[in-house]
Image (cartoon, coloured by chain):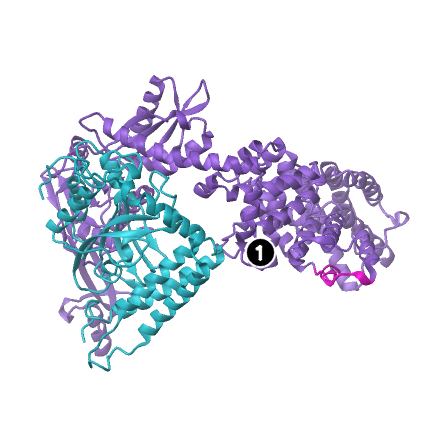
Chain colours: A cyan, B purple
Amino acid sequence: MNQTQGAPRSFQEIILRLQAYWASKGCAVLQPYDMEVGAGTFHPATTLRSLGSAPWAAAYVQPSRRPTDGRYGENPNRLQHYYQYQVLIKPSPPDLQALYLGSLEAIGIDMGLHDIRFVEDDWESPTLGAWGLGWEVWCDGMEVSQFTYFQQVGGHDCAPVSGELTYGLERLAMYVLGIEHVMDMPFNDPQSPIPLSYGDVFKQTEEEYARWNFDVANTDVLLKHFEEAEAECRAILDQPADDPKTGKRIVMAHPAYDQCIKASHIFNLLDARGVISVTERQAYIGRVRALAKQCADAFVTTKAGGYAA
Amino acid sequence: MPDLLIELFSEEIPARMQARAAEDLRAKVTEGLVQAGLTYSGAAAFATPRRLALTVQGLPAASPALKDERRGPRADAPEKAIEGFLKSTGLTRDQLEERETPKGTMLFAVIDKPGRAAPEIVAEVLADTIRTFPWPKSMRWGNGSLRWVRPLQSILCILTDEGGAEVVPMEIEGIAAGNTTEGHRFMAPGRFPVSSFEDYIAKLKRNHVILNATERADHIWHDAQNLAFAAGLEVVEDKGLLAEVAGLVEWPVVLMGPIGEDFLHLPAEVLQTSMREHQKFFSVKNPKTDRIERFITVANRETADNGATVLAGNRRVLSARLSDARFFWENDLRVAKAGMGEWLDSLANVTFHNKLGSQAERIARIAALARELAPMVGADAGKAETAARLAKADLSSDMVGEFPELQGVMGRYYIEASGGDAEVAAAAQQHYSPLGPSDDVPTAPVSVAVALADKLDTLTGFWAIDEKPTGSKDPFALRRAALGVIRLVLTNGLTLHLDRLIDAQLLRHDIEVHSGEEAELRDELLREIAQHGVFGAATKALIETLGENAPAWLEKITGHVPDTSDDLLAFLHDRLKVYLRDQGIRHDIIDACLAMPGNDDLTLLVKRAEALNGVLKTEEGVNLLQGFKRANNILTQAETADGVEYSFGADRKLAQVPEETALFDALDAAEKAIRPALDQQDFPAAVAAMAALRAPVDAFFEAVKINDDSPVIRRNRLNLLSQIRKTCTSVADLTRVEG
């Protein structure tokens, strides 16, 4: 990708440039995971693939949902549904910082005019039983990315260590495009025959989901779904590794992990509905973490997880 | 004499760890060098976000050669003994020396330990330093197993003498030491060679890196003040922030920008906290308006447009942040003006501790205790209770949710906004104080009542559920709470019966009644207990009137065992000892005072201890103490031997010598002076009267033999000693004083 193509003009152009950049650096450009998640880290291409010894390099956009952040589309930069751009490379290459800075240049940030800083920020995901060390990256005082060296995921030490980059796409794009309110941001090229803003695409859905998340979602049903997802996850992992039908060894780490993701998202919804007390909160997080750990335990007994039969 | 230069170049080191890491590098390397025989004349270490550097001057080129001499067996010793010696030294028989000694011909092993070249030692010490570096948090990266704070990228390690610089050959996890480094990441990319420490500093500066953190901080502070001064403004000093910012940049460039008009009405604490916590900005105050009107940010570089883009970006981010703060403020003001009910209600759903209930329950307990305390500290009971009820309401506010460090400060603003009383509002801000040993102690009565109630409730609560501090573990900061109680009492000269207050609050934790008549009854009973004690007559009378209608929980009061309150009081006394020791009062002096009645009244206790401490610094006092000890020893021995207590009172008529009569007079005089002095709590007077006994007691011991041949006279003298003991120990238990 040519990096001297000038300033991008739309949200989607920034995404396309990131895709092209990371593809040119050898990443497999994956598609979003087809489930509701709170962050790009939950995609199995990050959570599970950061485990085990097999090398890995992937980049993808992940739609992410944080029900408590919904503001009916009125807050200039808070959304209950937003996009993250996620890069995971294992083992972390020695020039990962330089590669990352290259990606900022690719989306039109002029390295000669801006002040880029790596500010300590240790990452921890209590629901995934994961932690790492790294930074939040500041551009002129604004956090534009998270940069993390994974040390542990699902209770397993990461060896080799993965380098993870997470870009909050809306915030980053608003900064690059000079937009004050997310809903005003051009989604496609403003010169297009049918120019669409972020608001044209998402204002209505933000309202609809905010209402549902905060006031309507049936908490009894959600609580039941949580229990079911938890039970199903356990049931899947309780199956013997050898499939009686095919006679093959098939550990179902991914289907089990889907149930873990589901439980995690339902917990977020219940949290937004305000039905989880402070003490219960810890208990729910602990239950999701237990699932994540069991899925990680299962994944490392699969081929992709580095298991040699 | 070569000089050593080391640089460990890595990805960005957290600002808060840099200073410590530089010091650790210096200590570990120099200690390692000295242990290996390399002395040095000077060393200094430095840190920037991307490097730790160390210069060690005046090393010898090699460690000194040593001769290791060991004496073996006699030359004519059995073969086996000689063989064992050869084995242990690794030598052969013909390499041993034979020497004549007074014990005969002995075998000696003389092993030459040649000196080792400095590079070899440096390589070893540095590798060991890197592998065992005490980072507070470290990580692995890539395929490696080495741990460092962030990925270690290169090592510079050279020894420089008149002949030039030489790279110390060493390698760790595929990183070979060299003589090159990098300058500023953006302003001067690329590597360059370095030949000495002076060359290193100069080239770094040319490549836009200031190595010394103090120099960076000075530079930032100097430029910030100049910028502000030129605009007729003042930078708000913040040393912690300055040190942090100096650790975030290698090439500081100070920029000043305005805060949007829309935000200038926000409380100064909000502006300052938001800017410092989120953006690491300094606040700039206008002395004419006394408002925070601008910010100062420190960029890590110069840019082609002289920082215009950087400043514009920072302004935008600040606007977004302050929009949030303004949203919180406006939203909070709405709730505050409506009486804060929304917040108070929601505190019922916030757990304080799973065994101590919700914040709302905690607040109700504190409010009840504050009401009981009010008359004892000169506060209006109604105001104290209201203040306690409102003081923690801000915990539910949006602003405190975002900036927990603004708790109390926001409470004051919100209570003022709700039209609340000024004393009540001040109490919201002050009731957390004192937080540390140097924090100001509240003196406004309402604030004192709430601050004491808050801390006593915390202490009794955690004592009730047996979560006391152990060793270095004090997760609920109970030592700090205890010190807070002590300082509140002493600073305000309060006379409090802490044991009664503790009993009452422990029972409040124990008896859960939330409303209705029973709750009123409980509070009435606890109020009696707070004032007159669990076993006071008034409390008993009140309990008796209940007759058969007594609720089941009454047993908790009638059967109250003071073990827990005694234990908590002992904890407070321990903290008091630590506190007074720092003020120069010995622990045995405090022990002597603690043994006296009324020791839960800390003000009284300290007055007594100060008076005793004062007199024991005088010659009179020291001698009297010795006289007292002599009297007490003789008396105790006699009492043990005779199996009786000599407390009958001595008879003046049996006095044999003038010195004995004089002691009778002196004891009478002392008693007459001490009793009223103690009643008035005039401890200096009491102690002075006691010290006046010194001369008569000394003279008495000079003149008489206690164990007189006449049993009558002996008994009388022992009874006289008993009177000395009684008189002296009415002031403090001198038996506990050492010396």
Q: Check disc 1 and report the residue beneath it.
A: B356
State the extent of the magenta-drawn residues as a range: B548-561
Task: Tell me if residue A59 comes above or below residue B316 in the rendering.
Answer: below
Does the magenta segment cover residue B220? no
Q: Which residue lies at the image location 17% right of the left edge and 59% below the top edge?
A: A56
- Lateral position of residue B238 relative to residue B519, left or right: left
Q: Find residue A95 and report its horizontal and vertical position in percent.
A: 15, 48
Most extreme residue toward the right is B653
Does the magenta segment cover residue B558? yes
Q: Find residue B564 and report its horizontal and vertical position in percent.
A: 65, 58
> Depth check: A27 or B738 in front?
A27
Q: Find residue B447 and report its horizontal and vertical position in percent.
A: 62, 37
Q: Is residue B17 visible?
A: yes
- Lateral position of residue A194 relative to residue B244, left or right: left
Q: Quadrant of residue B18?
A: top left
- Lateral position of residue B482 relative to residue B68, left or right: right
Q: Find residue B4 and report its horizontal and vertical position in percent.
A: 19, 42
Kind of residue at disc 1: Leu
Task: Tell me if residue A308 comes above or below residue B234 in the rendering.
Answer: below
Task: Tell me if residue B736 comes above or below residue B81 in the rendering.
Answer: above
Q: Is residue B42 visible?
A: no
Determine the secondary structure under disc 1. Answer: loop
> Depth check: A169 or B525 in front?
A169
